[in-house]
Amino acid sequence: MKITGELAMGLAALVQVHATILQQLRVHRNTCKLWGYQKLFDKISSHREDVSDHLDSLILRMLSAEINFDLQNINKLNIGQTVEEIFVSDREMAESCKEVALKLSNIANQNIDVRQLTEKIVLLQTAHINFTGQQLELVRQMGTQLYLATRC
């Protein structure tokens, strides 16, 4: 099924955001591994796998719809230098992705496959936004050192 116009541009934008998220999560995941924060490494790895699956689904839809897309230029990465910065930057990236997916969902009325995929993406990113928000609140309440000692 050929997809053109605003829907095609929205899919390309969503692919670009997902590609950016994957790279940022890769760095954050490896940073947590280096720091010895296995629980956080596992959580980021799980989220990264879900984002990767969504990216694969998006790319497959775009290829089948003969939409050109460019993965050479991803958005700017915001790499956290502390666990708190990692949570903040990942939450910001998830919010950006959710926003793009919501816009795309609103214009994908006639394309059920795209609408269903964007709704899944919105749910995943909402869950990640909530998770990072909860972790930041725990850091605030417990203090960084106790949080790191008990949660990571």
Image (cartoon, rainbow, N blue to C red):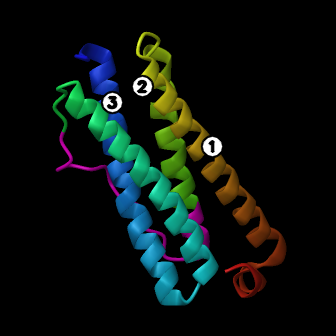
In which image quadrant can residue 57 be found? top left
- Work out whether 130 lies above or below 70: below
Residue at screen point 51% across, 27% down:
116
Residue that numbered label 3 is attached to: 11
Tell me residue 152's x, y (percent). Answer: 66, 80
Spatial CA span between label 3 and label 2: 9 Å
- The reply to whether the magenta stretch includes residue 129 is no
Q: Secondary structure at mark 1?
A: helix
1 and 3 marks in contact (CB < 8 Å): no
Q: Which residue is mark 2?
A: 114
Horizontal placement of 119 versus 61: left or right?
right
Which of label 2 and label 1 is nearer to you?
2
Q: Answer with mark 3 or mark 2, whichever residue precedes in sequence.
A: 3
Q: Which residue is mark 1?
A: 126
Q: Earlier in the sequence, mark 2 or mark 1?
A: 2
Q: Residues within 10 Å of mark 3 (few under 14, many from 20)?
A: many
User: Judging from the image, what secondary structure is the residue with disc 3 in?
Assistant: helix
What is the secondary structure assignment of the residue under circle 2?
Answer: helix
Nearer the observer, 145 or 4? 4
Q: Is residue 39 above or below residue 89?
A: below
Q: Residue furthest right?
A: 141
Give how far across and how far down residue 41 sits, in percent. 54, 76
**Rendering quarter of residue 95:** top right
